[in-house]
């Protein structure tokens, strides 16, 4: 079985993987929608929000409860106008 690493794992950061995935998703949806929206879980916000901000995403200001398995947190929505 191949080694599987999350894109945000410290040992694989700063290699351009997240940017390439982001750019591919934007290219794939361009022309079909005028905005992309993402939910950022507070437990991951320290890593993900600076990345999204550098790519032009903006917080929408809302916060909603988030629960997955045993994780309980808050999700804040961000959006990118295309």
Image (spheres, rainbow, N blue to C red):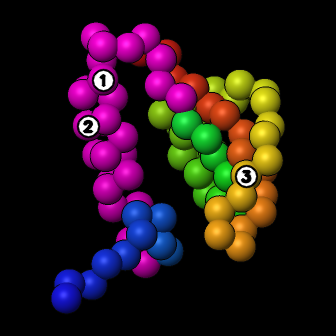
Q: Which mark is residue 14?
A: none
Closer to the chain start, of discs 2 and 3, is: 2
Residue 29: x and y, percent? Answer: 30, 23
Residue identified by numbered label 3: 66
Label 3: few (<14), some (14–19) or many (≥20) C-alpha neighbours in 10 Å: some
Whether residue 13 is visible here, answered yes or no, is: no
Asked if residue 62 lies in the magenta stretch, the reply is no
Label 1: few (<14), some (14–19) or many (≥20) C-alpha neighbours in 10 Å: few
Residue 61: x and y, percent? Answer: 78, 27
Label 2: few (<14), some (14–19) or many (≥20) C-alpha neighbours in 10 Å: few
Residue identified by numbered label 2: 24
Whether residue 25 is visible here, answered yes or no, is: yes
Q: Which mark is residue 29?
A: 1
Q: CA distance from mark 1 to mark 3?
A: 26 Å
Residue at 28% x, 11% y is 31
Residue depth check, mark 1 versus mark 2: number of the one nearer the observer? 1
Q: In the rendered view, would you say 7 is above or below 28?
A: below
Residue at 33% x, 28% y is 26
Residue depth check, mark 2 versus mark 3: number of the one nearer the observer? 3
**Left or right of 4, for residue 57:** right
Residue at 32% x, 56% y is 17
Looking at the rendering, which quadrant does residue 13 occupy? Answer: bottom left
Image: magenta residue range = 11-37
Q: CA distance from mark 1 to mark 2?
A: 9 Å
**Left or right of 57, for residue 31:** left
Residue 37: x and y, percent? Answer: 54, 29
Q: CA distance from mark 2 to mark 3?
A: 27 Å
Q: In the rendered view, would you say 71 is above or below 61?
A: below
**Left or right of 59, for residue 21:** left
């Amino acid at each position: 079985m191949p080694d599987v690493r999350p894109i945000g794992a410290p040992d694989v950061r700063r290699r351009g993987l997240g940017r390439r995935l982001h750019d591919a998703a934007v290219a794939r949806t361009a022309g079909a929608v005028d905005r992309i929206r993402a939910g950022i879980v507070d437990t991951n916000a320290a890593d993900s929000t600076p990345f999204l901000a550098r790519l032009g995403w903006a917080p929408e200001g809302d916060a909603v409860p988030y629960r997955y398995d045993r994780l309980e947190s808050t999700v804040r929505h961000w959006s990118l106008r295309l």
